[in-house]
Image: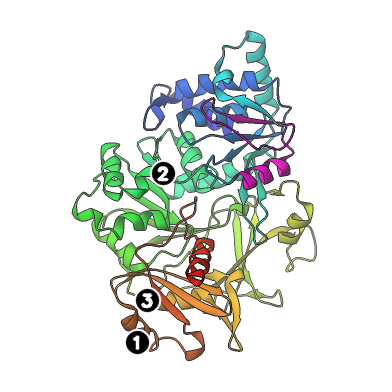
Amino acid sequence: MDRTVVSYFKNTAERYGSKMACADDVSSMSYKELWEESHIISGNLLKYFEVRKPIPVLMKKSCRTLSVMWGIIKAGCCYVIIDPMLPKERICAILNTLQADYIVTEESFVVEGLPKGIKVIHQERLRDAITETQKNQVENRIRDICDIDPLYIMFTSGSTGVPKGVVVNHRSVIDFIECFVENFHITEKDVIGNQAPWDFDVSVKDIFSAVKTGATVQIIAKKYFSFPIQLAELLEERKVTTLIWAVSALCILSSKNVFSHIRPKCIEKIIFSGEVMPVNQYNIWRRQYPEALFVNVYGPTEITCNCTYCVLKGEYMEGEVLPIGKAFSNERVFLLDEQDCLIEKKKTNVKGEICVSGTAVSMGYYNATEETERHFVQNPLNKMYREIIYRTGDIGYYNKDGELCFLARKDFQIKYMGHRIELGEIERAFYKVSGIRQICCIYHKSEIFAFVVGDTDTKKITREIRKILPQYMLPSHVINMNELPLNNNGKIDRKGLVVYLEREEKC
């Protein structure tokens, strides 16, 4: 049984050494090359870091970044990827939370405004040859890794706007990935098209599914998602078989009529998460790839990628909800009502908070005890022994088939005109209006704004939505957009929409 993800890597490097492990726009590496280079990097890191320390990495995603990540893991430490495009204030907030002494970056980057005392390590210097003694030290570090040692820390914004670093250990990743690759038949023959930034947990599925099975990761630069036809051409050129993408990223292709120009032929698996997939966009993909495996997966960063999945069969009717399905093996997912009582599956359409327990639940937030204790709590259904669950803050319900469905964020529940409203319910209703491709509702200055992307004018939308929603749930404003802004993780940028409104107000 594999105890750490390094075991995955070693087994695959021995079995598929000459096979391509990863490729980006300018380079590629075999599994043997990646193993050897990451070993050298690890040896050079030992003089800077003790075991189990977080190592921040300020680099764009690439094969070289991946070798740095594996060097960190082999050193018995955990990687923390930081997007170089983040605002300096957020980078500093992350580094302060980590109490970092060093940051790994590239010589070409000019890093300014770092917290006082932090030293820069250029990744190029970590590739200098190491001695036999250093090699032995790396082997000792690898041997001493425990499965509960942290593997990575990923920062979420949190409802307070203060970055929270989710700590995930080796055991949680192994527990999840074993099930993930088996359920969705990922093998050494697959080519995974990496869309997700590496500071976003969708990337964990790309990186560790590949190293578990011997699949290849094709690293897709962010720039391609601004040019949908070029993106599709890249998928075709690289013979990508597997897309584990955010919903908004998939919609970039389906909503721009790209398939009438080019249809990548090798795609066999389409696994999506992060937001509610519009049924009309899912149906476009399904018509193009009727034999492909389509999976809707759900779960926050705090529970190691995903906790539920639903393998989707055929097309869905407009207005239907794509279920998030059932729990992955060795995870327990359930709904609690406002009195912390269990909502049983037979109680259809009864809303409750989605809660998760199991090995995949993360270790909590780094250097944030109070926040950890607020969200990672004793299961209120269990009074007999310690059982930590994660309260997701998401609202869900069971459909008539007993499948779990996502409704909305608890944070998006508002009190409007004397009624308690889920913004997600309004968004779901909008998808019943023909011609709408994307919708996002926000509550701003006591009004509900609906931002819509589609082929239908606002008058028709307003007329149709009045037939579906009660008066008190109708948005104050319906705004047509050419496209919705996306954040770095490929999700709809709700804060960006607020900025848009504030800018319009000033005008």
Give the colour scheme shown.
rainbow
Looking at this view, is 118 or 366 the one in front?
118
Q: Which residue is mark 2?
A: 222
Q: Secondary structure at mark 3?
A: loop
- Expressed as whole percent of the image width and height from the top left, the position of residue 41 reads 58, 21
Give the residues drawn in magenta, as a range: 88-117
Asked if residue 59 is among those painted magenta in the image, a careful observer would answer no
Looking at this view, is 360 or 161 the one in front?
161
Q: Secondary structure at mark 2?
A: helix
Question: Could you tell me if residue 405 is visible in this image?
Answer: no
Q: Is residue 397 above or below residue 136?
A: below
Alpha carbon distance from label 2 to label 1: 38 Å
Proximity of marks 3 and 1: CB atoms separated by less than 8 Å: no
Question: What amino acid is at disc 3?
Answer: Gly
Q: Which residue is mark 3?
A: 319
Q: Which residue is mark 1?
A: 463
Picture quadrant of residue 2? top right
Look at discs 3 and 1 and give the one toward the viewer: 1
- Expressed as whole percent of the image width and height from the top left, the position of residue 363 reads 70, 48
- Farthest residue in the top direction? 132
Proximity of marks 2 and 1: CB atoms separated by less than 8 Å: no
